[in-house]
Image (cartoon, helix red, strand yellow):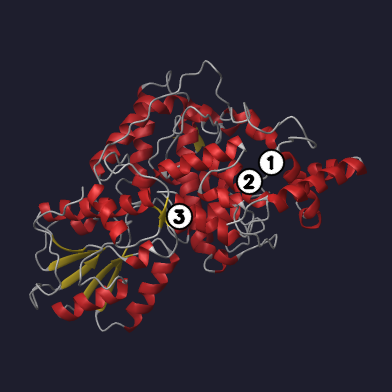
Amino acid sequence: MNELHSDCLTSIADLSTEQFAEVALVLGDQLNSKHSWFAEVRQHRLFVMFEMRQETDYCRHHIQKVVGFFAAMRAFASALADKGHKVLYLALDNKQNQQKLLDNLDAVIKHTQCNQVLLQQPDEYRLDHMLSQWSATSKATIDWYDSEHFLTERDSLTRWFGDKDSYLMEYFYRRVRKQTGYLMNGDQPVGEQWNFDKQNRKSLGTKDPLPEPLLFAHDVTPLVKLIEQQGIGTMGNIEPQRFIWPLHRGEALELLDYFVSHLLCHFGDYQDAMHTDSWTLFHARLSFALNTKLIAPKEVVEAAIDAWQNDPERISLNQIEGFVRQIIGWREFIRAIYWHFMPAYSSTNFFDLHQPLPSFYWNGETKMNCLQHSIQQSLDHAYAHHIQRLMVTGNFALLTGTHPDAVDSWYLGIYIDAIEWVELPNTRSMSQFADAGKLASKPYVSSGSYINKMSNYCHNCHYDVKRKFGANACPFNLLYWNFIDQHFEKLKSNQRMSLILSQWQQRKPDDKAAIIDQAQAFLESLPRS
């Protein structure tokens, strides 16, 4: 997965003038071999792909993320060349690589004298804005194409529900169900119920079997050495001879098949569970393959539904519905939210928070077992599932007053599946409530009781989750009520917070003072990055 196919072109200078009538740009998250661009070989069309410092340096990425994208890009370029397509691939250390997208594009166009450029709509606002501005001034004719990946359009929120300040995923999800016919009997949901989420909140018992994940074992040593030689700053850990993530479509399909065959039958039940003995549990871990477009949401959902229909006794309705909702509900909805509210969305800060991240987010060195495990797992595997991100690391970041920009940057960098369109709404809205409720109906903060209910993290922890304050009290318990007190005025208008606010008002003044004093002392003791 490190070496390019011998037919890949690697030099702009070697391109023959007037050989190509079209230049088609393929970005690192546009690795969709089923795209109509690739349906037939056109010798006059040149596909261009670039490894760039522009993309490695806009935030500090996990080493596995940089390796994963570059290795998947190289595999994709090689597969295109193997089928006879003309591909120019500029690796990171190519002397002709100017390390910026527009500079590289301009160099190719100038040398080939090509006047036709094909672009797929980027999924990131940053790249979309960059290419849109460039296309408005370029002398070449620019043709825009859909990525042919998603089930819905960018502007689906406005078209379906009008221009609003906030939206609910549930209504969006039902609309997509009706549009696609997934899990539908005519115009009614299978099982006479749209959502089985209340059945999908089980924690793992001591006798529940923990499944083994399907892991690949790519040798990416040359890529790791290249990244180090180029001085790219990264975080996290990697085993260069055992890179575990899928790097081409065949492996993505293999991972999908493993999920529907072995894991889907328990996915819904335990999708919110956490356990120290398994970092994967029953999760599909298809997000990297999906977000790079190695596979499509349509085929993922249909493979899962086929498995359920073929064995409904083994795979119950709540398992399949929970998974389908993640793909056609949350994933599509998050994208729609992103495009509806950008670019102002990326600077929201409802609670006016300004602290940097605690420094242990970069090394996992904390006595809090839940954070230590979730962060170390992220550093080791560039992965954590949604509850670890939302209710452990995200919850703690919000309760400790961390600036949303710092949280955004960390999530965008540390996870192999993190691309801004999917990371930013999940962080700003679901995790940090920085947008004041455009997506989430309340802040997703909790005391230690939720983590204790859904995991075994609190077992053998330095802190006592049962203690609300006092010696060795769980910091989540202290910080939760401190947060409620600190932001009481901003939370008063949120009806879903009224019970909690009332409970805080009814606490004994001495208890409230003790909690706040201890929480403040803890916050002052936090090492900050």
- At label 1, counting other C-alpha atoms closer than 10 Å, the crowd grade (few under 14, some 14-19, many 20 or more) is some
- Point out residue 394 in the picture as x, y percentages from the top left corner: 59, 48
Dot 2 and dot 1 residues touching (CB under 8 Å): yes
Task: State which quarter of the image contains the C terminus.
Answer: bottom right
Residue drawn at point x = 23 percent, y = 40 percent: 250
Label at residue 413: 3
Q: In the image, 344: left or right of 179?
A: right
User: Callout 2, which amino acid?
Assistant: Asn
Secondary structure beneath disc 3? helix
- At label 2, counting other C-alpha atoms closer than 10 Å, the crowd grade (few under 14, some 14-19, many 20 or more) is many
Question: Where, by quadrant of the figure, is residue 436 drawn?
Answer: bottom right
Query: Disc 2 versus disc 1: distance between alpha carbons?
Result: 7 Å
Question: Where, by quadrant of the figure, is residue 404 drawn?
Answer: bottom right
* Residue sitting farthest toward the top: 207
Q: Name the residue under label 1.
A: 446
User: Callout 3, which amino acid?
Assistant: Gly
Label at residue 395: 2
Label at residue 102: none
Q: In the image, 33: left or right of 442?
A: left
Residue drawn at point x = 77 percent, y = 45 percent: 481
Dot 3 and dot 1 residues touching (CB under 8 Å): no
Q: In the image, 459: left or right of 60?
A: right
- Point out residue 107 in the picture as x, y percentages from the top left corner: 22, 77
Q: Is residue 325 above or below residue 351?
A: above
Question: Where, by quadrant of the figure, is residue 101 drawn?
Answer: bottom left
